[in-house]
């Protein structure tokens, strides 16, 4: 089981890089050189981050990206949600439909507790805390 996908990993690295520039506009070319992320991936990632309101883009000469708000107000879970949706450790599927025992399943209650704990821990991680 992977907690973070490749796109989420690339997105976190890109957002940390942008945050480290202290409000300056960062070009895609600069990020490609520094982060070694393939161009097509980085462009798609930045578009998704822009649509989600994590970064803002500036077009034209001298254009690029900057954070939409302070790094301390961007959580790791926000970026995970953009690329992976909400964190779910167990879907409770049985034969491609919802398991009829999910309401009284002892394992599900344990996994739900783990899921809440992991989500809270990830929510406490901000981009700001990662660049310190």
Image (cartoon, helix red, strand yellow):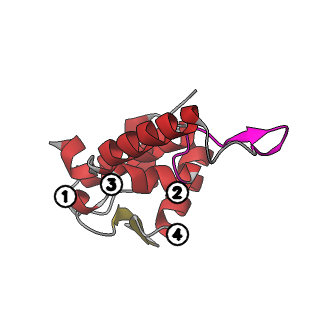
User: Residue 29's x, y, as percent?
Assistant: 45, 49
Question: To which residue does mark 3 refer?
Answer: 75
Q: Residues within 10 Å of mark 2 (few under 14, many from 20)?
A: some
First along the sequence among labels 3 and 4: 4
Are the residues tagged 3 and 2 within 8 Å (C-beta)? no
Quarter of the image for the C terminus: give it: top left
In the rendering, which numbered label is found on residue 22? 1
Secondary structure under the numbered disc 4 in the rendered image: helix
Q: CA distance from mark 4 to mark 1?
A: 21 Å
Question: To which residue does mark 2 refer?
Answer: 82
Vertical position of residue 107 compared to residue 69: above or below: above
First along the sequence among labels 4 and 1: 1
Tell me: 85 left or right of 50. right
User: Residue 114's x, y, as percent?
Assistant: 42, 36
The mark lying in front, picked from 2 and 4, is: 2
Question: To which residue does mark 4 refer?
Answer: 51
Res 71 quadrant in image: bottom left
Quarter of the image for the N terminus: give it: top right
Secondary structure under the numbered disc 1 in the rendered image: loop
Name the main secondary structure of what is drawn in magenta: loop
Residue situated furthest top in the rendering: 1
Depth check, front residue: 78 or 107: 107
Tell me the residue at 55%/61% (across/down).
48
Q: CA distance from mark 2 to mark 4?
A: 9 Å
Q: Which residues are magenta?
A: 86-99
First along the sequence among labels 3 and 1: 1
Query: Does 95 lie within the magenta span?
Result: yes
């Amino acid at each position: 089981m992977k907690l973070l996908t490749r796109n989420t990993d690339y997105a976190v690295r890109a957002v940390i890089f942008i945050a480290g520039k202290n409000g300056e506009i960062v070009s895609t070319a600069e990020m490609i050189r520094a982060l070694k992320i393939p161009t097509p991936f980085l462009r798609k990632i930045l578009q998704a981050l822009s649509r989600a309101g994590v970064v803002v883009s500036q077009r034209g000469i001298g254009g690029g990206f900057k954070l939409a708000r302070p790094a301390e107000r961007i959580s790791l879970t926000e970026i995970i949600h953009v690329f992976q949706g909400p964190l779910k450790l167990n879907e409770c599927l049985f034969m491609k439909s919802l398991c009829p025992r999910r309401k009284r399943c002892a394992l599900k209650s344990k996994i739900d507790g783990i899921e809440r704990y992991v989500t809270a821990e990830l929510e406490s991680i901000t981009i700001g805390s990662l660049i310190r």
